[in-house]
Image: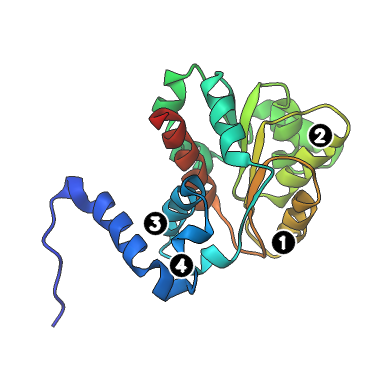
Amino acid sequence: MIKLQEIHPAEIEAESFRIIESEFTEQTGKQISDYTAVEFKVLQRVIHATGDFTIAEHIVFQNDPIAVAIAAIKAGGNILTDVNMVASGVSSNILKTFGGQVYCGVSELETAELAKNLGITRSDAAMRRYSDKNIAIAAIGNAPTALISIIRLMERGEMAPAVIVGVPVGFVNAAESKELLKLQNVPAITITGRRGGSPIAAAISNALLRLAKAE
């Protein structure tokens, strides 16, 4: 017999987070103290979004990305995403309180035309078109070509996001693009390997936004 929890709708998220904390060590073999308090909050939200504790084994925080992201958000920076699914999942209302907004140009006609003219993907073209938008977070959850584009633009001094959330998913250059990101001397959060996706990119972005709001 299946027994369902009786819980008020407003308490579901808090209860989910409590369960994650209570099961974390058993599920992962790690201690919560293996992470800083803010790192665990980010990881906890990713686990909540995916139902997958094994993410703990693969998440990477490099060059103090959380503190850098919070400062950039509070300074009015924007969030640039590779696909509309990430953009729609980001808590834009929190971002707006700091003066920022969410950008995603992948579906725009100008992006499609640029991609066709240059023989590149629309995700790559969108990164090129929006490279100057005072980017606090570049949140990439779907397209490896978008992450590779950001790295190349940064190398040429044409883009300078404060933090890269690089979690593209897939089998063609997804893992490789994230390994390339790990070689860069930039604040970033990534998930190694082929896994990733829009829900993870949005979850990380939202965790950063909530941490900024809480300060």
Relative placement, left or right, of 166 versus 70 is right
Q: Secondary structure at mark 2?
A: helix
Tag 2 residue: 154
Callout 2 environment at 10 Å: few (<14), some (14 to 19), or many (20+)?
A: some
Tag 1 residue: 175
Q: What numbered label is drawn on residue 79?
A: none
- At 47% from the left and 66% from the top, the residue drawn is 31
Alpha-carbon span between mark 4 and mark 2: 33 Å
Residue 90 in the image, given as x and y percentages of width and height: 46, 37
- Labelled pair 3, 2 in contact (Cβ < 8 Å): no
Looking at the picture, which amino acid does disc 4 mark?
Phe
Tag 4 residue: 53
Q: Secondary structure at mark 1?
A: helix
Looking at the picture, which amino acid does disc 3 mark?
His
Residue 171 in the image, given as x and y percentages of width and height: 70, 65
Q: Earlier in the sequence, mark 3 or mark 1?
A: 3
Alpha-carbon span between mark 1 and mark 4: 19 Å
Q: Secondary structure at mark 3?
A: helix
Residue 195 in the image, given as x and y percentages of width and height: 60, 63
Q: How is the image coloured?
A: rainbow
Looking at the picture, which amino acid does disc 1 mark?
Ala
- At 26% from the left and 50% from the top, the residue drawn is 14
Alpha-carbon span between mark 3 and mark 1: 23 Å
Of residues 86 and 98, which is closer to you in this image?
A: 98
Alpha-carbon span between mark 3 and mark 2: 32 Å
Tag 3 residue: 48
Residue 102 seen: no
Q: Earlier in the sequence, mark 3 or mark 4?
A: 3
Alpha-carbon span between mark 3 and mark 4: 9 Å
Q: Earlier in the sequence, mark 3 or mark 2?
A: 3
